[in-house]
Image: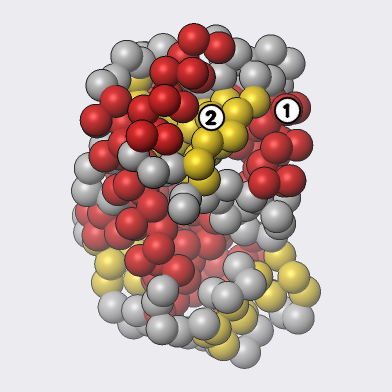
Amino acid sequence: MKTVLVVDDENDIVQLIRYNLEREGFRVESAATGDGALLKATEVRPDVILLDIMLPGKDGYEVIKALNQNERTMDIPVIFLTAKSAEFDEVLGLELGADDYIVKPISPRKLVSRIRAVLRRYEGVKSEENKSIDFGKVVIDRESYLVKIGGEQVFFPRKEFEILYYLASHEGKVISRETLLSRIWGSDVYVGDRTVDVHIRKIREKLGDHAEMIETIKGVGYKFKAE
């Protein structure tokens, strides 16, 4: 049974979501504040988190940043479920690593469908055959979500890790932005090219002296090349 952590300070919404998810066979945990969400996520380690943005204390953006910086929670898929419908909010949420961004209200059937789509995509990523890629000074371990650069462990949030791993596992091949968008976020989530470019920039910053291993192919996408 998959567990969903619902984070929202409106109890009526939480209970409505709980009723519909439990009816579809999910186990539901809940939290009403940002700090409560972080505590619950660490304790329960849910399969997916439904996260509101406007929360008491830490808002949803701060929560997802904290989740991505914690080794116990960094690999949990996050779906923003919020009343904030501005394009800026959606872009920011996805750039911070969210797997989907859903604007309230949404029908229970669509919500369940989007949750299952994220879970399927995440399970597909986890089941890839290669567990570790070793380029000498850069080692990418899929099983532990660890990256070592020059022998030093460097932290990569999940979306950055998945992009790096996907590029490295197709070393020498040009990967279009569209492929990365579809592979990492899924075809049912609208994410602009800018989101991919922002993640690539952050990855290069962390690669440091090895940043040139990711080559920009103008007008197409990116290519990973061993040094």
**Local SS, label 1:** helix
Mark 2 surroundings within 10 Å by alpha-carbon count, few (fewer than 14), some (14 through 19), many (20 or more): many
Instruction: Tell me the residue that label 1 is attached to.
Output: 36
Q: Nearer the viewer, residue 31 or 172?
A: 31
Instruction: Tell me the residue that label 2 is attached to.
Output: 6
Percent position (x, y) of residue 200?
47, 54
Percent position (x, y) of residue 174?
27, 72
The residue that appears at 33% across and 57% down in the rendered structure is 120
Residue 151, image quadrant = bottom right
Compared to 203, does 188 lie above or below?
Answer: above
Q: Nearer the viewer, residue 205 or 83?
A: 83
Q: Nearer the viewer, residue 39 or 17?
A: 17
Percent position (x, y) of residue 69?
70, 48
In this view of the protein, can residue 201 be seen by the observer? no
In this view of the protein, can residue 171 be seen by the observer? yes
Q: CA distance from mark 2 to mark 1?
A: 11 Å
Q: Amino acid at mark 2?
A: Val
Q: Amino acid at mark 1?
A: Gly
**Local SS, label 2:** strand
